[in-house]
């Protein structure tokens, strides 16, 4: 059975620039950002940190409800577990930022994205430290 290590809420915003001003005013520091088009501020996926608190913020369209990101140690084992239980999954996908991910949605359209660092992109993105 796959081991889940860290769950990260993903906050959806309409503007990455407005979110940066807001979160920085709260004392958070932007540690990384991924933009679909580097010439445009949106859509973007941004990480903010303050002390031990980490926030992931997305301005990508198509998000409804809450989006939770959960690191796992064996995505394929988790996929097989979900398929065996008849749970509909989205993915898995190899992302350009170095993770392999799959998602599931609950009846309220909340999205739970499970990710593992892709062996093909080791060093591109480091997973959250295990508690």
Image (cartoon, rainbow, N blue to C red):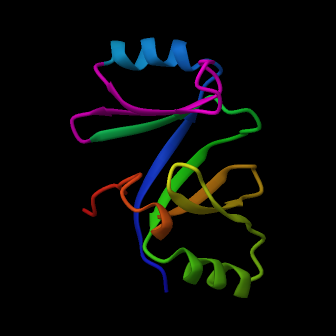
Does residue 66 lie above or below 130 as drawn? above
Residue 10's place in the image compared with 61, above or below, is: below
Q: How many marks?
A: 0
Magenta stretch: includes residue 43? yes
Compared across the picture, whether 89 is left or right of 20 comes to right
For the C terminus, the quadrant is: bottom left
**Residue at image location 21% in from the left, 35% down from the top:** 51
**Residue 15, picture quadrant:** top right
Residue 67 percent location from the top left of the image: 60, 46
Q: Residue furthest left?
A: 51
Q: Position of residue 90 (x, y in %)?
A: 74, 63
- Residue at image point 43% right, 74% down: 73
Question: Quick check: 90 left or right of 33?
Answer: right
User: Is residue 74 in the magenta section?
Assistant: no
Instruction: State the image coordinates of residue 97 (x, y, percent, origin top left).
Output: 52, 49
The span picked out in magenta is 27-52
Q: Which residue corresponds to the image point at 49% horizontal and 66% vertical from the top-left?
A: 120
């Amino acid at each position: 059975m796959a081991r889940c290590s860290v769950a990260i809420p993903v906050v959806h915003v309409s503007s990455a620039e407005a979110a940066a001003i807001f979160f920085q005013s709260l004392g958070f520091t932007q540690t990384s950002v991924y933009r679909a088009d580097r010439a445009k501020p949106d859509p973007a996926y941004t990480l903010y940190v303050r002390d031990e608190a980490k926030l992931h913020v997305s301005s990508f369209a198509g998000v409804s409800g809450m989006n939770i990101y959960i690191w796992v140690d064996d995505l394929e084992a988790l996929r097989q577990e979900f398929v065996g239980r008849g749970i509909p999954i989205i993915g898995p996908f190899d992302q350009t930022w170095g993770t392999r991910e799959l998602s599931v949605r609950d009846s309220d359209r909340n999205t739970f994205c499970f990710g593992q660092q892709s062996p093909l992109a080791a060093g591109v993105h480091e997973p959250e430290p295990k508690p």
